[in-house]
Image (cartoon, rainbow, N blue to C red):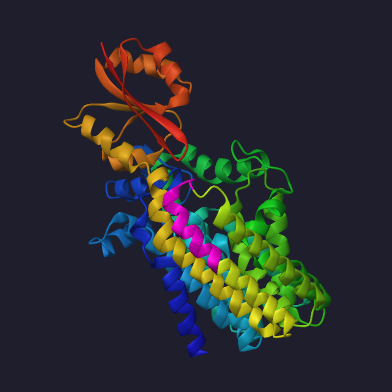
Amino acid sequence: MIRSIVVLCLVCSALFFVNLQSRDFWAPDEGDFAQITRELALDFIVPHLNGEPYAEKPPLFYYTLYASQKLFGSVRDEISLRLPSGLFALVGVVLFFVTIAKFVKLTQAFVSAGILATAPLYYWQARYVQVDMIFAIFVVASLLLFLLFYTTRRHSILYVSFLCLALAFMTKGPLAIALILPIAIAFLFSEKAMGIIKIRDICICILIFLTVVIPWYLAIYWREGAPYLYENIIRQNLTRFLDAWSHKRPFYYYFTTLPLDFFPWSLFLPLGIGLAFSRVKADPKTRYFLIWFLWMFLFLSLSSGKISKYILPALPAAAFMTSLAFMERDSRYNKAMLLILSFVFFALAGLLFIYQPGLYPEFYPVRIIIGVLSVTLTLALLFALRTTRMHWTFPVIFCFLVLCYLVGNFEVYGKWNRYKSPKPVGEKVASFVKEDRPWVYYGSIRGVYVYYAQRQAIHVDEHDTAGLEKIRGELNDFFILARRRDADEVFRTLSNVKLVFEETVGGTPMVFLHYEK
């Protein structure tokens, strides 16, 4: 087991930490969280973005970023603020492996952990400054510890499980309860084991939860009052679930995103789910992971607001069930999927080699490398199918994904950054707003520009032309940053506005304007 843990740690470290500084903070989220972390030094109780209270999430995620920034202050923020996501992702893989190794053979446990570590969504979130990875690992830890409690009946493990639930709550709010408790209750009910948790245990768990959660909520109520709590608890959770104001998507949304976010393992997930259903009565552990996956998939699908990253806490359960499929080496379904996978990657290689080689020419060497790896994968899978060496298939796919991700770490993100980075625009803004010259951000606030400009902006919401007129009455001279599509509103509202510069960031044209009476 120690050897497997070392291998997983080395692979995860290479995937999650190598070359983190190759790209700047990207909009929309990374720059927001970087700026919130910067402003946390001025107010440790109330998170702020651009000087305004930021009530979308509880503070534990920001505290984690702040601690990492202070601990690794000698390195760039692009590294120190991304490290927590990678560290939590690594811990999640190892904890997942160690836990399920108690119930299944070591080979299956390693396959499960390897699938999780190389799932595209998991890999990407491990290298990104967002709340979702840290939240997901607290949720996963709580559920894995609950399973350990059930098998060992050690009540101390139950208490640690609820501690993780409380920490998940302090990371992303009541969603933690909605994801964790129904799974635990449904599993105990299916086992007819509700009695293993005594009234005393429930009281201790509630006490642990309240001890973690209540202090900050009391402090924030004292500082900001009921409106902040309404935004943090009701609007960002209940309202977003029932009638989201953004990212409103149909019920079937995750049926369209999970196949890519979990590719290529998603090809084998249907067989894994089928095998889990066939063992649902005989194997309680498999039933636990089946309940875990189905509940999260259903609950998140019922939510009005959906983003693909929200499914992240369900990936360990998906990885476990997919490992069931890989243990069925003689399955006709597996052979069919491997054949399809071979043709997919062979076709991908052909496209990479011949399709518009002059398009983004700086990426063509990378296309050749990925194409060669795809051809190699195709040949290896076909050879395994031909010679019935089905035990080769997982390590071949696993190694292919690891190598592709490493190519991305070293060769893709730095070049992609030239098109995606808001930093050049932010630094240009900084060069104009020195000596306390005011500037306005017009539109939905993007903290990344505030972060790289190193100066807070006067924020005016999109289409709020009255807000622009108010600023015109108060200031004689100021700059304005806005999306090109919103610039016409600025020109119609304000006279004497001149274009300073225009640049495109990630496909979004941005304009920087100067107003002077």
Residue located at (46% from left, 40% from top): 228
Left or right of 498 in this view: 393: right
Residue 431, located in which quarter of the rendered image?
A: top left
Left or right of 206 in this view: 88: left
Q: Is residue 70 visible?
A: yes
Residue located at (63% from left, 44% from top): 305
Residue 491: x, y in percent? 40, 14
Q: Is residue 167 visible?
A: no
Residue 414, located in which quarter of the rendered image?
A: bottom left
Residue 213: x, y in percent? 48, 58
* Magenta-drawn stretch contains 362: yes
Residue 286, located in which quarter of the rendered image?
A: bottom right
- Asked if 351 appears above or below 156 in the picture, the reply is above
Which region of the structure is painted magenta?
358-372
Q: Nearer the viewer, residue 313 or 126?
A: 126
Q: Quadrant of the C terminus?
A: top left
Residue 92: x, y in percent? 51, 71
Q: Nearer the viewer, residue 364 or 295?
A: 364
Residue located at (69% from left, 76% from top): 382
Q: Nearer the viewer, residue 315 or 111?
A: 111
- Asked if 180 appears above or below 476 in the picture, the reply is below
- Asked if 349 appears above or below 287 in the picture, the reply is above
* Magenta-drawn stretch contains 248: no
Counting labels gives 0
